[in-house]
Image (cartoon, grey):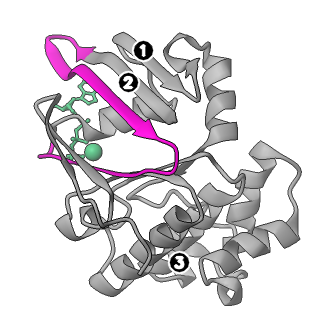
Amino acid sequence: MAILELKGISKIYGNLAALQSIDLQVQKGEWLAIMGPSGSGKTTMMNIIGCMDRPTNGSVFLDGWDISKATAKGLTRIRRDKIGLIFQQFHLVQYLSALENVMVAQYYHSIPDEAEAMTALERVGLADRAKHLPRQLSGGEQQRVCIARALINYPELILADEPTGNLDEANEHTVIDIFKQLHHDGSTIIVVTHDPEVAEDAERTVVLEHGHIARITENRMKGVMV
Ligand SMILES: Nc1ncnc2c1ncn2[C@@H]1O[C@H](COP(=O)(O)OP(=O)(O)OP(=O)(O)O)[C@@H](O)[C@H]1O
Ligand SMILES: [Mg+2]
């Protein structure tokens, strides 16, 4: 079953078409990578899928709902209920601890529950860093807090835009391993990356060029836990 379907999506800025006639289906439980040169439209596409922006033309179906027609309030609700977002710049609140940063996300979804936030940190291997402030954490640890924050409401769709862009190789592998586990547990994951090593673990790679889908490659044996 398709969890996400883009039909004829365009995004026009003045005389620049950041996206043009994008058609794409993503199946439930699939792990998809999006690659392409800088400026090819990757973040624009993720912002539309993540309910942070609207297409100029076309429809976006998430779980069968046409989100391109949702109101601003509706978009916020869909984002809160169905989507987990992970960014290259971690966007952590600097004066809150790791645990509190995760609890801020809970506040948007439900009632803050410290034990549940702690479980989310445990899932990314950070239980022993719960009281640390972001500046007391390494880049990789900060990104894992962001992943815990994104996972707090068990989102149907996990969107990550360059999640390893600011990480060294060891931390990159830690993050990829968490994605492997999430995929194994049934999450649908879309990850934008410049790094072929990150894309390699996805089941399919969509390559964008100048706002078009240039090609889609299948990695048949990938995305599987070994
Ligand atoms: N708000 C905006 N107003 C005008 N142009 C924009 C806006 N957002 C993006 N663009 C343009 O749309 C194009 C696609 O941008 P986008 O951020 O999607 O690229 P990207 O593939 O994510 O690049 P990168 O790999 O550098 O992150 C670029 O040419 C960019 O300058
Ligand atoms: Mg981008």
Question: Where is residue 211 drawn, in percent x and y?
Answer: 17, 28
Q: Residues within 10 Å of mark 2 (few under 14, many from 20)?
A: many
Q: First in sequence, mark 3 or 1: give its number.
A: 1
Q: Residue at x 82, y 67 (%)?
A: 116
Q: In this picture, is 222 found above or below 208?
A: below
Looking at the rendered structure, the number of numbered marks drawn on it comes to: 3
Which residue is at the front of the view, 99 or 18? 18
Decide if residue 21 is on the left or right side of residue 120: left
Label 3 is placed on what type of residue? Arg
Instruction: Tell me, for residue 59, which label it has, or none.
Output: 1
- What kind of residue is marked 2? Leu
**Image check: 193 left or right of 96?**
left
> Which range of residues does the magenta coloring cover?
12-38
Of the 4 image quadrants, the one containing the C terminus is bottom left
**At which x and y percent is residue 130?**
71, 81
Q: Residues within 10 Å of mark 1 (few under 14, many from 20)?
A: many
Amino acid type assigned to the residue bearing label 1 in the image = Ser
Q: Are marks 2 and 1 in contact (CB under 8 Å)?
A: yes
Residue 5 lies in what quarter of the image? top left
C-alpha gap between disc 2 and disc 1:
6 Å
Ligand 2 image-quadrant field: top left
Of labels 3 and 2, earlier in sequence is 2
Mark 3 surroundings within 10 Å by alpha-carbon count, few (fewer than 14), some (14 through 19), many (20 or more): few
Classify residue 19 by image quadrant: top left
Q: Is residue 141 left or right of residue 93?
A: left
Q: Is mark 2 within 8 Å of ligand 1?
A: no
Q: Position of residue 124 (x, y in %)?
A: 59, 77
Mark 3 — residue? 135
Q: Which mark is residue 6?
A: 2
